[in-house]
Image (cartoon, helix red, strand yellow):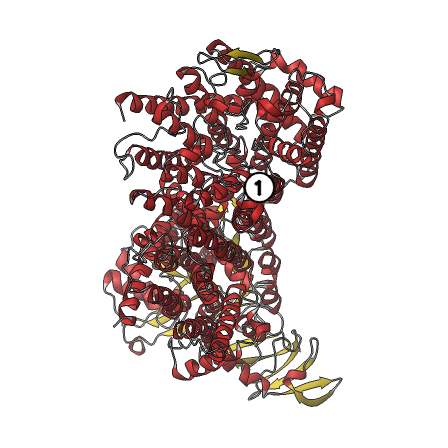
Amino acid sequence: MTTQDFIQIILYFTLLIGLTPILGNFMFKVFTGEKHFLLPVFGRLERWTYSFSGINPEEESNWKSYTIHLLLFNLTGFIFLFLIQIFQAQMPLNPANLPNVSWHSAFNTSVSFMTNTNWQGYAGETTLSYFVQMIGLTVQNFVSAATGIAVLLALVRGLSRKSTDQLGSFWTDLTRSTLYVLLPLSILFSVVLVGQGVVQNFKTYETVQTVQGATQVIPQGPAASQIAIKQIGTNGGGYFNANSAHPFENPTPLSNFLEMLMILLIPAALTYTYGKMVGSTRQGWTIFTAMLILLLIGLSISLYAEYSSNAIFGKLPLMEGKETRFGITNSILWSTTTTAASNGSVNAMHDSLSPLAGMVAMINLMLGEVIFGGVGAGLYGMVIFVILTVFIAGLMVGRTPEYLGKKIQKFEVQMAIIAVLAPNLVILLFAALASVTAPGLTGLNNAGPHGLSEILYAYSSAAGNNGSAFAGLNANTVFYNLTLGAGMLIGRFGIIVPVLAIAGSMAKKNITPTSAGTFHTDNWLFLGLLIAVILIVGGLTHFPALSLGPISEHLLMNKGITF
Amino acid sequence: MSAKQNISLFNKKLALQAIKDSFTKLNPALLIKNPVIFIVAVGSLLTTIVVITGIFQGNYSSFNLNIAIWLWFTVLFANFSEAIAEGRGKAQAESLRKNRTQTIARKMEGRQEIAINATELKKGDIVVCEAGDVIPSDGEVIEGIASVDESAITGESAPVIRESGGDRSAVTGGTKVISDRVLIRITSEPGNTFIDRMISLVEGAKRQKTPNEIALSILISGLTIVFLLAVATLPAFFSYSLAASGLPGTQNLTLPVLIALLVCLIPTTIGGLLSAIGISGMDRLLQRNVIATSGRAIEAAGDVDVLLLDKTGTITLGNRMATNFVPAEGVTVEELADAAQFSSLSDETPEGRSIVILAKEQFNIRGREVYQLNATFIPFTAQSRMSGVDYTSEDGTVHVIRKGSSEAIRSFVQNNNGFYSQKIQEVVSELARQGATPLVVAEDKRVLGVIHLKDIVKGGIKQRFAELRKMGIRTVMITGDNSLTAAAIAAEAGVDDFMAEATPEDKLHRIREEQANGHLVGMIGDGTNDAPALAQADIGIAMNTGTQAAREAGNMVDLDSNPTKLIEVVEVGKQLLMTRGALTTFSIANDVAKYFAIIPAIAISLYSGKNGVGPLSVLNIMHLGSPQSAILSAVIFNAIIIVMLIPLALKGVRYKPISANAALTRNLLIFGLGGILAPFLGIKLIDLLINL
């Protein structure tokens, strides 16, 4: 690694840490209804939204109603997206005359964008029209991220309120996070991207002659606006198939740096918002630090794996599958952050990462997408681990475990277990199914342990609502479209519903004031414990499979055997 | 036989019974209550079937047999831990019950007396007990007064008075009347007396799981499902890998190996010991002579963060003590002390004795030969409100010394034409204001001075409160004294807060207020008027000497009637929760090493090429002898760790009054780090032994 590499990494994390309290504080104001500078600009839009949809923004609901509102909203989005895909040919804004999408691919894509996963079994430019991309996908990019924030807000209210069953209004949370956070940031960022050279137009695809005399079709379209929200909303669904490795999506080193920063920006800032909302920024920073440490551990292992010599290439860098424009460090920083944050956009092919770097990416997914994670989703997933940690370790101080003064009892443990179980169920069961059945195995491009990694990665990506892929897998088949679609649904709502249930149950409880007998959740000791619990629970669950996949591959590679 | 006896950890008789019970507990209907151990039992059964069918098919495998045997041991060890805990608890409770079941009750039917078996008594029945009778069941004295020997339950040999009305009316089944005759109304249904309830709390079969225990069972069951998934999907990944390595699918993992892996991973240690921990918590409470009426109570005790403590008896010794002599003008302090001591020589009250002792300690004034002085002692009466002594001095004059309340002495002196000075009155009011009791001493018509009688704070109590504070528990002193007095004693005892001039309603109100603010409140009480507060408190400990109403309202009964017991109960509760947390952490931490033993063992052939040793063998960091011995060692370690931890489960982790953070750090080092390292050592050792 060169000095520039180190400087860039340090700059990246300094900016991330610096922006966290600024954006976090702003979001705190937005979500608690305090005055902020965007109110004069968008305030009227918010009121219009409410009066147009007949919503009383003051009307709060209990956890069950909140959940029903959320599910209905997502279901509506899913049905709409499904329909416009299977009737794409009859819809406007289709200059490339793309045909209707197959039912299973439309199902998979609709689920994928509704769940903030953005798994793409199709190639964007050759499958979907401008209409579907804009009215369908981009809209879901906003509202799926806003849904994640809404769940988090309900959870925070459950933790900070007492003796009530009201968790706030899903509609208000959805509107505010879209209008004041996601939309302004996206507008700002797409303008910056256009400035860097990202395309944003409605032109038909251009056919050009290459230098060597071949003809090439160059796709066009409204890319910048979708790329902005795909990075900001931890969506990751690229406009083009090559995602952010494509020069139209990611043209310059600056655009690359900013796109990477946007991956973690909101998930990181939400930890600060969380801290402020529960009444102690230390609580937020503790979670932030735990996430940061886990991220840095993964990053270090990946960089080590990529830069150390191996039996096949010696000291030569492993550039296959990576953009020469970005080089190793930028590819690895991206692969680590995008898998940690449940974003899933890529600027290098994860399939081509060295086995250990690929494993780190996979572990990021398998740990439940809690290392910053998806917008809102990462943090509420992390709170589930916090609850488990508090429960196990809290007993050791001799009291019924409590978090933020709320006792953790049977119901919370039950729900937390369901939330942990749901994604792991998807990963293990579906991956096992795919690795022994013909429809699963026919999708593989590689043999040996690497093939197993491809399968594991796909289902981990679906379960974690990440959306990135070990691209070696041809997943646009009925089998993969359906199983991955089911995996995304379970991975999303199998966590959201238990989290909201916990929020509802916590809101009813009284808050025990802190004393010397209280188990503290805002110090280094707890931080270490939290990291240990995440690694041990995740590690113990997936170690057998990982050892047969990437670990075997790494060991074999060092003996000079590849697949 | 008293409940107080300490049963040694592995009493031979108990151990034999427990071994027997370990087998009867193999009954699936009982096993299913513990999902983790149930899964182990199912695994053992399946492995046994594999071994047996193997024999019939002519491919007997000693490896499979060993696995099967050790899996059964795992189940038996878990059963044994529960059985031994139950046995210890039962042994203590049984001796209490024995007394009562053989008792014949003399039930009153109208004016007639009929003899029936004590176990047939119902709530509301009235029985008569005379000297020599054993009281047949819990009840309340409704007529008469008697002295009762309660040594059967308290171990205290001195008989106690039980009488109708007032705060000493409750009697406990199994205790014995030694004098007089009382009518008792039975207050508990058959089979539902305190002792019955206590027994049911330690008997595994009838035992209700407590809330935290349920939550923890859910957690470990959830982990079990996770590991079940991980193990159940392994053959699929394995079959893929076999195909990729060019090996035949017949080399896939066998059922015994998969079961061995599963059993090693699921939290069998905590799963096996969980009920033993709960039962022994009850048991420890019983050893302290406290009977809990529900398991929930002992858990809540660990959570209590506010203690309401009565001043008298808990914080202060019950009686006031002389601490100081304040002489009147023109009187030396020695003269005052001498007169005070002389007047108190035959005063047997604690106050009187404390005056004698104080005079002796401060001025070395000794008791004198009383008869030489022709002294006549005048005892305290409610009418005179004074006590003292009349004596004849050497010159033959009769002198009269009196001590008593300031009003009484004032009229005594003035009747003798003496002078009661303003100065004395000031001293008296000053002492009263400080919360002390001033006792004025006069000889004939002269006031000698004032004895300062004061509440004495119990030795060591201040340190105890400091410990509680470290644990995050706030203490509130309850007293009927005025606020000045209360403040003075509160400061001296080091309590955090006090309630002066507290009525029972005030107590109840205070408890509700604390609870509304999220606190859990513990209190101890005895009187009928304490009952509402005892019922409201999260932990209400009724003293055994108290009324039946109080005993019904509280969720624990302290047989020793020692108000300081509340603090010990809190400690037992905390220790119980700590033990659960520590063993859960240990159990999960153990898994790391087991993976390093088993994964390389099962995956050794994959991608191995010619020499048969695949790349994953580098994970065999313990350098275990062979794949089979590695798996077997992990299973054996997993089984015997349960037995090795039984003493810890029964005794509880060592408890120290330290802050939450300090306790956590300590337990994490021992059980977290220890839990990761111990199996590496253990498995390696077992493997060395197997390969000898």
Residue sitting at the far top: A195
Depth check: give the residue in front, A470 or B109.
Answer: A470
Depth check: give the residue in front, A560 or B156.
Answer: A560
Assess disc 1: are there few (<14), some (14-19) or many (≥20) residues with their C-alpha within 10 Å of its C-alpha: many
On the image, the x and y values in percent for residue A411 come to 59, 51
Marks counted in the figure total: 1
Relative to A141, A370 lies left or right: left
- Name the chain letter of the residue that bears numbered label 1: A
- Amino acid identity at mark 1: Gly
Q: Quadrant of the C terminus of chain A?
A: top left
On the image, the x and y values in percent for residue A192 come to 49, 12
Q: Height in image: A71 above or below B146?
A: above
On the image, the x and y values in percent for residue B193 come to 60, 74
Q: Quadrant of the N terminus of chain A?
A: top left
Image quadrant of residue B170?
Answer: bottom right
| Residue located beneath label 1 in the image | A491
Q: Height in image: B329 above or below B136?
A: above
Depth check: give the residue in front, B246 or B549.
Answer: B246
Residue in the image at 66% along x and 26% along y: A172
